[in-house]
Every structure is written in C-alpha cells, then in structure tokens.
C-alpha cells in the first residue's frame, strides 16, 4: 500500500502540475505575456507547485529535512538532469535576458540560501526577505517582458490552442486539487519508506521526493524542447529554481515558528554547496555562446549521476565512498575545465561574445 500511495502521489502531482500549467499559461497568453516570461513565471511557478505543497506540508508536520531536501534536490535535478536531457535532445538557444538577468538571479538566490542556512536554520526574517525578493523578481520580469514583447512581437504559434477563460479556470482548479491530494500521498509514503529502510528524511527528500515533485518540470521542458519553444524549456528550469528558493523556503521559514525551519548539518555541508555550484556552472557554459549544447548536456548528466551515487554512498556508509569521491574528482573536475575551455574558445573563434544577443539556430 505504501508503494501504491507513492505512485498515486506522483501521478496526482504530475496531473496537477500539468493542469495548473495549462490553465495558467492560457490565462497568461490572454494577458499578452511573452513565451519567455510565461516560462520564467507562470510555467516555472506552476511546475514548482508540487515542491511548494510538499515542503509546506512537511514543515507543518515538523519534518524540516524533507522540506529543505525537497527544494535543494529539486534544484539540482532541474539543472543537471532536465537541462542535460533537453540539451541532448536539441541544443538549447538561450535568450539574452536569461543569460544576463535570470541566471545571475538564480545564482544570487542560491548564494543567499547558502548564507542564510549557515547557522542551521532559516528564521522568519530570512523567510520574509526571500519572499519579498521573489515579488520584486516577478514584478520586474513581467514588466520587462511586456516591454520586450511590444518592441519585438513574437510570431504566432499555430500549434498553440486558442485560450478560453472557463476552460483555463477549470484546469487551474483541478490542477490545484491534484497537487494538494498528491502532496499528502507523497509525504506520507516517503516518510513510511524512510522509516522502513532506515534512510533519513533528508536523503528521501533529496532523491525520491525531489525527482517526483520535479516531474512537471520534466514534462514541460522536454515538450517545449521538442516543439522548438526553447525559451520556455530553459526559462521553466531557471524560474523554477528561483521560485523554489525564494518562495518555498521563504514561506516555510515564515510558517515554521520562531525558531524557523531547521537545516541539517549534512545538507549544509554537502547539498546546498552542491546546488550553488550547479547554479554557478550554468554561467560559463551558457554565457559565452548563449547556447547549451550536447557536450554540456552530457556533462550535466554525468554530474547528476555522480551526485546521486555520492548520496547513496553517504547514506549506506559505504567503505568505497572515499575511492568513489576521488574518482569523481579525478574525472569530473578535468572534464568540466575542458568543456568550459572549449566553449569559451569556440565562442571567441566564432566572435560570439557577450555582446551577441542570440546565436543562430
């Protein structure tokens, strides 16, 4: 029954996230918002709704490791696995605004969490600060997107169905309902599994729950990549990561009580620095060419596999952990240096530096 409850929770979260994205995207198109802004805000926030529901519920139930691990694990999953898979399917052209505005904001939000979590908790004023920063980001992004849309209108997408207010509202309603029920199922089943196998809430949150709540991002980004809407594919991931930190951990810090939401030493020591490093990795791989190619995608996937195997080794106290860690460092660091050097060298050879706004398709 626990496994059935886990599967049902994942299915309901996927249905709810997709329904919320459909309805909210339709409402946004009716308001004349561009694809990039829809990806950064409506789609990103809609697909992050499962993480929000799960983390808030875990906080209310006094499971801070699950609440924080879900967010940190989802952010690592979003960049390394989702962008990695999308880049392998089709090299991703990255809009100028994403490179020079939104990726730095994602990096800044990650560094902010790194600093706030150092004392072992995210307290109320820190949660309020993060949530206020999210509101500023949303307002600025929507206004900037409307200005850009007026200056350079987007071509009509014949595959996009016409909007309908009643239909969009129905999708939003049923999407939210699926998210609420699914999050209850997922938290209950994940907690039971952790107790049965003696695995910590942090590891469950960083792996199973993080991957499960990120399924809407997987579906939305891969579908957008296949359809050629790469602004939505990349904007969804960047916007989701910003939302996960500033909104979800901001809200959990606000509702957790005077002591805030606790951050375990293990997450502080390894996972939050890993999440911040992943965010920083996006800058040199994306900025020079405004493009995420297949080599970078393969590099991202390599790092995700290494991260998961490291978590498993830590959780099981494997004697091979030290050898494995050394092997990852021996292969991963030189690989990253080679990839970044090749990207920068190629961009200079092609004359495609930061002043280039968009590369050829």
Image (spheres, rainbow, N blue to C red):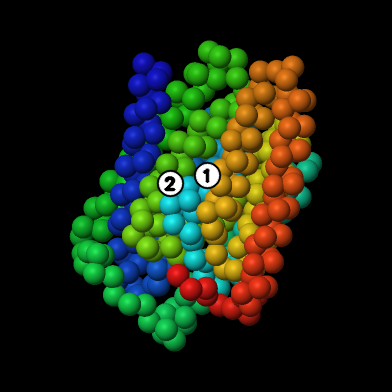
Q: Residue 75: in sight, yes or no? A: no
Q: Residue at x 50, y 33 (%)?
A: 209
| Residue 218, disc | 2
Within 10 Å of disc 2 (Cα), the crowding (few <14, some 14-19, many 20+) is many
Label 2 with label 1: CB-CB less than 8 Å:
yes
Which residue is tagged 1? 81
Can you give x and y, in whole percent of width and height, for residue 104 in the image? 65, 64
In the rendered image, the residue lying farthest to the top is: 196
* Quadrant in the picture for the N terminus: top left
Q: Please determine whether, in this image, residue 124 is positioned above or below residue 40.
A: above
Q: Please determine whether, in this image, residue 140 is positioned above or below residue 286.
A: below
Within 10 Å of disc 1 (Cα), the crowding (few <14, some 14-19, many 20+) is many
In the rendered image, the residue lying farthest to the bottom is: 151
* Quadrant in the picture for the C terminus: bottom left
Gap between marks 2 and 1 measured at Cα:
9 Å
Q: Residue at x 76, y 25 (%)?
A: 323
């Amino acid at each position: 029954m626990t496994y059935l409850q886990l599967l049902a929770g994942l299915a309901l979260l996927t249905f709810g996230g997709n329904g919320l994205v459909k309805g909210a995207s339709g409402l946004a198109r009716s308001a004349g918002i561009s694809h990039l802004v829809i990806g950064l805000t409506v789609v990103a926030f809609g697909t992050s709704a499962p993480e929000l529901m799960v983390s808030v519920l875990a906080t209310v139930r006094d499971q801070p490791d699950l609440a924080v691990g879900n967010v940190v694990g989802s952010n690592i999953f979003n960049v390394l696995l989702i962008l990695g898979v999308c880049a392998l399917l089709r090299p991703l052209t990255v809009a100028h605004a994403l490179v020079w505005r939104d990726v730095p904001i994602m990096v800044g939000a990650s560094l902010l969490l790194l600093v706030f979590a150092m004392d072992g908790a995210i307290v109320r004023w820190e949660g309020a600060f993060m949530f206020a920063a999210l509101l500023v980001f949303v307002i600025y992004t929507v206004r900037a997107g409307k200005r850009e849309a007026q200056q350079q209108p987007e071509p009509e997408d014949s595959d996009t169905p016409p909007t309908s207010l009643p239909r969009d509202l129905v999708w939003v309603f049923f999407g939210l309902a699926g998210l609420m029920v699914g999050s209850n199922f997922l938290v209950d089943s994940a907690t039971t599994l952790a107790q049965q196998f003696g695995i910590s809430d942090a590891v469950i949150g960083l792996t199973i729950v993080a991957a499960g709540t990120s399924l809407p991002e997987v579906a939305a980004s891969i579908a957008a990549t296949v359809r050629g809407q790469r602004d939505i594919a990349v904007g969804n991931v960047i916007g989701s990561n910003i939302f996960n930190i500033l909104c979800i951990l901001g809200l959990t810090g606000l509702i957790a009580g005077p002591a805030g939401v606790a951050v375990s030493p293990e997450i502080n020591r390894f996972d939050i620095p890993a999440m911040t490093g992943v965010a920083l990795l996006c800058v040199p791989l994306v900025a020079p060419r405004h493009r995420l190619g297949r080599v970078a995608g393969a590099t991202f996937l390599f790092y995700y596999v290494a991260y998961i195997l490291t978590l498993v080794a830590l959780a099981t106290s494997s004697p091979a952990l030290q050898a494995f860690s050394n092997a990852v460092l021996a292969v991963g660091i030189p690989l990253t240096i080679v990839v970044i050097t090749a990207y920068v060298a190629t961009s200079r050879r092609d004359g495609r530096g930061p002043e280039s706004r968009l590369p050829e398709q």
